[in-house]
Image (cartoon, rainbow, N blue to C red):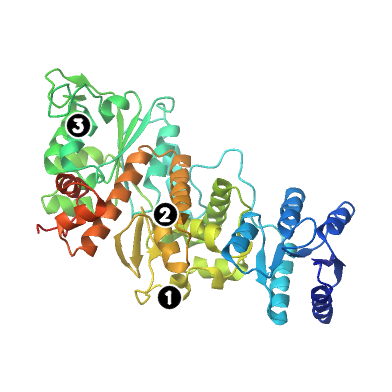
């Protein structure tokens, strides 16, 4: 094992650390400044580097940057007498394993150095991103059945209904079906029917003619026309309004539709893949979903397993999401210790794969050091999933909740960070960028519309809560007009508002 290098212009600090580490039978090598250490790097490398942040000449941050450029996997611990946020942020942005604030407890310092040493000695458990990341990851038997079904359907244009809990990856499966179909070179268009207000959904699907309604200043092609010769993915089909189900059935039956306000039929050569987390059979029995449309959609049915049914896949998914998140932020991927991975694999994650992805984003941003231990995970997870309602847990599809009770929010990771640690005033912008990057990397469409609606909804809900539901007061505090907030409340489906 290589020695631990200590870089500090204070001889007393070097002496204390040398003696403490010697008692642990750990070899050390000391330097009085960063220049001496950089010279030594030309012929040798340490197992762990411990450096002061402020020294004559090059600073510890300068040393950190130079070392990380040559040896990105080397754990570096920064010592600072200025235990302020700027120093901590600079250290972590530069890739530091962790930092110590003077005066420090020597036993805690040794424990931190030992942890960094274990990190350095541990074999890399995270592989670099492959040249082409698989659309869907999973080794569990339940996922192998899904893969086999995708393979069998690879040369088919048949309609497919995908069912499964929220966050199980229904859109990923739809994209895989498209990619491996004869229509692969044609458009893949996705539409979440639950995210579009009822009054706008018909126009979104079928388009409209100029003058069809107020504001329709030009003809607009709908999603069916945009997906011509390709695949149209209709997510959350169970939430489609009943009257629109009739129009969809007609398209599936005869392959023609009319734009809103139009009189000429438009031919549709589109493969439809639908998805829902709801029990469509029960919705048919309840009179909320047309039985004839259900049979039209339910030609081939794929059920996606929940993460509980494929817990063996949690380690591979976790490693993938940690690498993906680090790649988006331009940092080194975090690694889960064996104990933390076992703990994570034993959790029941109601948000399924989406919740796991949000959790990995949180770990990349918030967990100290490169190796993540159980104590580094969000308190909600380590204190038990039932929880006491103290902090929100990241769930699926931009939802957050305390325990198992989800409530609408602007995004799981943003809310979790706000509850877990103090953030800079602009910290949420970084997390918004991370969320947008993840959606864009996944090939999701209408990112601006989706995130914009979530942002507006979060602001209006918060203002209404603050004003006890008084709509006019909320509009005034948000700096928008009464008519604007009334329209937004209807468009976004916000409850709880009342007149003054």
Q: Is residue 28 at all visible to an observer of this figure?
A: yes
Q: Secondary structure at mark 1?
A: loop
Q: Secondary structure at mark 3?
A: helix
| Label 1 sits on residue | 384
Q: Residues within 10 Å of mark 3 (few under 14, many from 20)?
A: some
Q: Residue at x 28, y 23 (%)?
A: 269
Position of the C terminus by quadrant? bottom left
Q: Which mark is residue 203?
A: 3
Q: CA distance from mark 1 to mark 3?
A: 46 Å
Q: Which mark is residue 283?
A: none
Label whose residue precedes the other's in the sequence (3 or 2): 3
Q: CA distance from mark 1 to mark 2?
A: 20 Å
Label whose residue precedes the other's in the sequence (1 or 3): 3
Quadrant of res 47 = bottom right
Q: Which mark is residue 354?
A: 2
For this rendering, which residue is in front, 155 or 373?
373
């Amino acid at each position: 094992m290589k020695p631990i290098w200590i870089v500090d212009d204070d001889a007393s600090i070097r002496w204390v650390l040398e003696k403490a580490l010697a008692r642990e039978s750990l070899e050390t090598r000391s330097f009085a400044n960063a220049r001496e250490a950089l010279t030594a790097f030309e012929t040798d490398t340490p197992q762990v580097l411990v450096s002061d942040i402020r020294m004559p000449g090059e600073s510890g941050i300068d040393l950190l940057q130079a070392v990380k450029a040559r040896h990105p996997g080397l754990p570096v611990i920064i010592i600072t007498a200025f235990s302020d946020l700027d120093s901590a942020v600079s250290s972590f942005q530069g890739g530091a394993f962790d930092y110590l604030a003077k005066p420090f407890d020597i036993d805690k310092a040794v424990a931190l150095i030992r942890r960094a040493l274990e990190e350095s000695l541990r074999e890399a458990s995270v592989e670099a991103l492959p040249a082409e990341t698989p659309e869907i990851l999973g080794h569990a038997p339940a996922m192998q059945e899904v893969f086999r079904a995708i393979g069998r359907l690879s040369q088919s244009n048949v309609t497919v209904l995908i069912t499964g809990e929220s966050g199980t990856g229904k859109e990923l499966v739809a994209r895989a079906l498209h990619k491996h179909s004869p229509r692969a070179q044609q458009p893949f268009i996705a539409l979440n029917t639950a995210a579009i207000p009822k009054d706008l959904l018909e126009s979104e699907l079928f388009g409209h003619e100029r003058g069809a309604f107020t504001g329709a200043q030009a003809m607009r092609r709908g999603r069916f026309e945009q997906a011509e010769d390709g695949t149209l993915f209709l997510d959350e089909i169970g939430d489609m309004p009943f009257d629109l189900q009739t129009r969809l059935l007609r398209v599936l039956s005869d392959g023609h539709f009319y734009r809103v306000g139009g009189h000429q039929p438009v031919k549709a050569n589109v493969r439809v893949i639908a998805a829902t987390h709801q029990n469509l059979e029960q919705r048919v029995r309840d009179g909320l979903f047309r039985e004839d449309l259900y049979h039209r959609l339910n030609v081939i049915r794929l059920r996606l397993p929940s993460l509980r049914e494929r817990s063996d896949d949690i380690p591979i998914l976790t490693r993938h999401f940690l690498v993906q998140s680090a790649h988006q932020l331009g940092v080194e991927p975090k690694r889960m210790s064996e104990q933390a991975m076992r703990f994570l694999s034993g959790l029941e994650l109601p948000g399924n794969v989406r919740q796991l992805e949000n959790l990995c984003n949180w770990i990349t941003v918030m967990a100290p050091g490169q190796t993540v231990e159980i104590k580094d995970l969000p308190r909600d997870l380590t204190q038990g999933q039932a929880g006491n309602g103290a902090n929100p847990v990241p769930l699926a599809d931009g939802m957050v909740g305390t325990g198992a009770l989800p409530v609408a929010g602007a995004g799981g990771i943003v809310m979790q960070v706000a509850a877990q640690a103090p953030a800079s005033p602009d910290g949420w912008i970084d997390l918004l960028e991370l969320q947008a990057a993840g959606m864009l990397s996944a090939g999701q469409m209408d990112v601006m519309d989706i995130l914009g609606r979530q942002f507006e909804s979060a602001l209006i809900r918060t203002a209404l809560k603050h004003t006890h539901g008084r709509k006019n007061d909320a509009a005034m505090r948000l700096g928008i007009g009464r008519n604007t907030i009334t329209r937004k409340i209807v468009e976004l489906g916000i409850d709880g508002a009342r007149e003054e």
